[in-house]
Image (cartoon, helix red, strand yellow):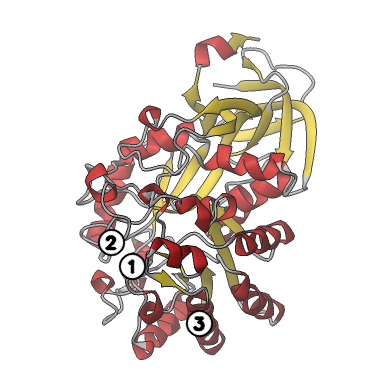
Amino acid sequence: MTLFLENARIIDPEAGVETIGNVILDGGLIAVIGAGSAPAGARVIDCGGKCLAPGIVDIGVKIGEPGERHRESFRSAGLAAAAGGVTTIIARPDTNPAIDTPEVLEFVTRRAAQAPVRIHHMATLTKERAGREMVEIGFLLDAGAMAFTDFDHVVTDTRVLVRALTYARGLGALVIGHPQDPGLSKGAAVTSGKFASLLGLPGVHPMAERLGLDRDLGLVEMTGVRYHADQITCARSLPALERAKRNGLPVTAGVSIHHLTLNDLDVGDYRSFFKLTPPLRAEEDRLAVLEAVASGLIDVICSMHTPQDEESKRLPFEEAASGAVALETFLPAAMRLYHSGAMDLPGLFRAMSLNPARIMGLPYGRMAEGAPADLVLFDPDAPFVLDRAKLHSKSKNTPFDGQRMEGRVIATFVGGHQVFGAENRMMRDA
């Protein structure tokens, strides 16, 4: 079906501009931008002056299959993603069992086909994420692995890590690290400081992230591997990242939307929905990291979607599981940055769509003729109060429950097909 999207506020993260115009989608691609009239036989969608942007490409989404389907399935994650304007998910391998063999990767790839959005998978860097033996990187690449990471199971044996990085470098594979010193961060529930002491909770100093990043960057310099730091959350880490980029190392970095919009004080009265990995940081760190995203030093904003069931979260804060769902709250949370004046819309979608797609070697995230027609139509100003019970995810562990937010997704398109939105009310024949 040929679609004609008229009267859209077009967000182009590549050119860094916004324009008002019409867009034609045909054959799964963006055929024409700036068309004057609808071609014969096309279905017309009146965008009403709302924003039309490339669909979000979300690196680091946790999905419960295999092993924890009660927390999140591919279908529920896909529905949540479509409702949140996320058109491509890069799923984490920290499943049960872990995605550490081609057979497991092929299984989850088949299961993911039922989702309404695109889902690609990462594989672990070491077998069972145990840090003792690297996986068969070449075979996993052939099976479709997008990158390799043990996520928060940081490899402590440097010799094993160097061997894996060297092998990944030889195959051109991307390695994603979780910058954290595991000894300092073990058992921590919050970021250390006066507030953590008042709450009586075990904390981790921000220097743990800096030490982990310094080690990883040193090994990147040694091996030449392509490296992405999944979350940079502290001001102390930024000089090292800037120096690595200035020296030409193949390094990129990301940060979760929660660490850009919340701080350590939000933990409040031991609210376990605010317990994350790494923990929420001080407001000074949040502002410094936000500035780094705006300047381009940090390349990617991600949701770090981590579903946890009620039994895992309704525990004393120190014992509760870490993580929050975010596929549906990603865009409205990002609108907080837009409405505060911290970032403009092209800059936000550069970090949420264009840059993650480029890092993963995918053709998405662009508002250009010939690019895949993966798009999100949204109203950045629409207010609402978030009700976690209405989320499409199986798990409802969001820190934004009951909060006033702005930014509603009107429609989501994947390959030119509408996968979310009130299609009948929006469409008419040309």
Q: Is residue 213 left or right of residue 42?
A: left
- Residue type marked 2: Ile
Quarter of the figure that contains the N terminus: top right
Residue 345: image quadrant is: top right
Between discs 3 and 1, the one toward the N terminus: 1
In the image, residue 307 sits, relative to residue 297, either above or below, namely: above
Q: Is residue 354 left or right of residue 134?
A: right
Q: Secondary structure at mark 1?
A: loop
Q: Nearer the viewer, residue 429 or 19?
A: 19
Q: Does residue 278 appear in this view? A: no
Question: Disc 3 marks which residue?
Answer: 211
Element at badge 2? Answer: loop
Which image quarter holds the C terminus? top right
Q: Which residue is mark 2?
A: 99
Task: Please state the horizontal and vertical placement of residue 52, each as a whole percent of the image.
Answer: 66, 32
Q: Are marks 3 and 2 in contact (CB under 8 Å)?
A: no
- The amino acid type found where label 1 is placed reads Thr
Residue drawn at (68%, 75%) of the image: 242
Image quarter of residue 9: top right
Q: Residue, x 36% and y 29% (percent of image)?
A: 389
Cα distance in 3D space between marks 3 and 1: 22 Å
Q: Which tag is nearer the camera, tag 3 or tag 2?
A: 3
Q: Which residue is mark 1?
A: 124
For marks 3 and 2 on the same chain, the one whose residue lies earlier in the sequence: 2
> Amino acid type of disc 3?
Leu
Identified at 45% across, 71% down, the residue is 177
